Image (cartoon, rainbow, N blue to C red):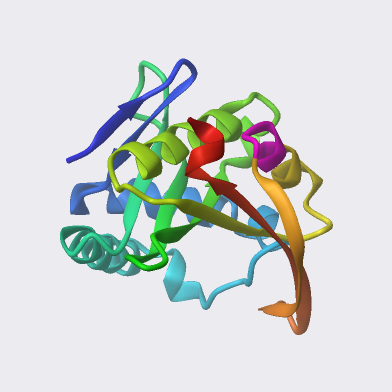
Amino acid sequence: MIYLEGDTCYLRTLNVKDAPSLADLVYRNKRYWSIFEPLHREEYYTTVVQREKIRESLLLMNEKREFSFGVFAHGTDQMIGSISLYSLKRMPFSSGLIGYSIDEQFIGKGIASEAVHIIKLFGYDHVQLNRIEAYVSPRNLGSIKVLENNDFQREGLLRSLLFINGKWEDHYIYASISEEYR
């Protein structure tokens, strides 16, 4: 288990016992999150499917291809989001993508910004990445602010990147480079 602590939240790798909490989190937020990511089939929001997603994530973590964490309210065991460093590429790229979702009840409190900061440091210091990228909808002003607060730079527009709820949507690509962090 990996545990990373911040001031307002902490991150820890999930285990299969977290599946009910993760299923509850994704179910509660499915409409809110569907503004910027695809809706899933109903079974996706079940404990069974979330348990399998956790198992897959643990396998990928053992292969050092992905690191997925629950975001928890500081001082509690309440899961309030998730964050991942995934699609990890080794040399000559040494890069990965970051993705995150925070419970609607906890947005606007700086938790997403802190979680991104924590995972960015983890990516540079422990995974030894040179570059961390993020894709974000041009309409997702909150997520853009999170990335920019963490010194990610907008590098361009990826046209028709993601199929969300019946249509292809453009996304900005943001990136952070390790030498700019140090």
Vertical placement of 97 versus 180: above or below? below
Instruction: Give the image location of residue 93, x and y in percent.
Output: 42, 66
Instruction: Give the image location of residue 146, x and y in percent.
Output: 67, 38
**Residue 79 visible from this viewpoint:** no
Instruction: Give the image location of residue 87, x and y in percent.
Output: 41, 67
Q: Is residue 56 left or right of residue 174?
A: left
Q: Is residue 91 left or right of residue 146?
A: left
Q: Is residue 30 left or right of residue 11?
A: right
In the rendered structure, which segment of residues is drawn in magenta? 146-151
* Residue closer to the observer: 120 or 50: 120
User: How many numbered badges does the structure rendering display?
Assistant: 0
Q: Residue at x 42, y 34 (%)?
A: 121
Instruction: Give residue 46's quadrant in the image.
Output: bottom left
**Residue 93 visible from this viewpoint:** yes
Q: Residue at x 39, y 41 (%)?
A: 124
Q: Residue furthest right?
A: 139
By secondary structure, the bulk of the magenta-drawn segment is best described as helix
Q: Residue at x 33, y 69 (%)?
A: 49
Q: Is residue 175 left or right of residue 72?
A: right
Q: Reply yes or no: does residue 86 show up in magenta.
A: no
Instruction: Give the image location of residue 1, x and y in percent.
Output: 17, 41
Q: Residue at x 60, y 32 (%)?
A: 113
* Residue closer to the observer: 78 or 162: 162
